[in-house]
Image: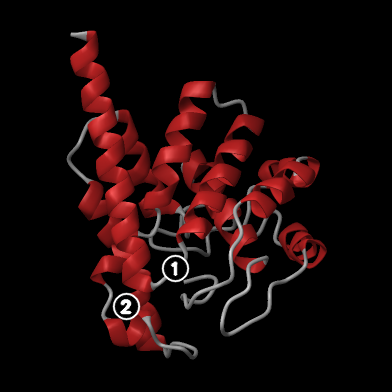
Amino acid sequence: MRERTRELHETRLQVVRHLGRAAKYRDEQTGLHTIRMSKIAALLAKGVAMDDEQCDLVLNAAPMHDIGKIGIPDHILLKPGKLDPDEWAIMQTHAQIGADILAGDDSDLIVMAHDIAISHHEKWNGKGYPNNLIGEDIPLVGRVTALADVFDALTSERPYKKAWSVEQAVILIKDESGQHFDPKLVDYLVKKLAQIVEIKDLHTIPATPTTAYGR
């Protein structure tokens, strides 16, 4: 029975990884962005007292955060310039689409991936999407993933922008503490910055085309 449970867990992990890979190819993100942000998210999770099992779930569930982009039309998802208001409204639906894709499974991994997909664009001040959640009403795993995702996006080179320096990214993130991001998570990111930079350095390759930060 224990062996069967282990095999089922491994199968679910493989499904999540393959779906994450599908989302990566859909919007042309680099796979290493997903690796970096999920490792950073797991590090942040540890900082807010998640146990080792929960941190491992974050590591494996966070790559699913943008799976809903599979449902966004190419002319919007791959648009090189700024989205107009109608296009932006459609782009925002990727959070709900992702949650719908991941709904209906009661495994801890898929439940967490669902919570991340639906909440990683919520903001601490209630001005995020899709549900305008405020503060601790946002699932902790969503808050963790949001900060990890934004930090890596800011400090990564893309065809439309140069990589921000770590210092520039930290300034913006501090400015957004209590606005976009959970203040406790921002404090912990700053505290563990050396480890986060090490993660980035270990998993960096030249950039490939991707979508803009914040989408």
Coordinates of residue 75 in the picture (x, y in percent) = 31, 88
The reply, left or right, for residue 43 in relation to residue 71 is right
Q: Quadrant of the N terminus?
A: top left
Q: Secondary structure at mark 2?
A: helix
Which of the labelled discs sits on residue 90, or is there none?
2
| Type of amino acid at the residue the image marks with label 1 | Gln
Name the residue at the top extreme. 1
Write the residue at 47% across / 27% down: 54
Write the residue at 59% across / 65% down: 153
Number of residues whose C-alpha sits closer than 10 Å to that of mark 2, classed few (under 14), some (14–19) or many (20 or more)? some
Q: Earlier in the sequence, mark 1 or mark 2?
A: 1
Q: Is residue 121 visible?
A: yes
User: Residue 166 falls in which quadrant of the image?
Assistant: bottom right
Q: How is the image coloured?
A: secondary structure
Give the CA separation, mark 1 to mark 2. Answer: 19 Å
Coordinates of residue 8 in the picture (x, y in percent) = 21, 26
Which of the labelled discs sits on residue 29, or is there none?
1
Q: Is residue 186 visible?
A: no
Q: Judge by depth and name the residue closer to the eye, 74 or 129.
A: 74
Q: Secondary structure at mark 1?
A: loop
Q: Judge by depth and name the residue closer to the eye, 109 or 97.
A: 109
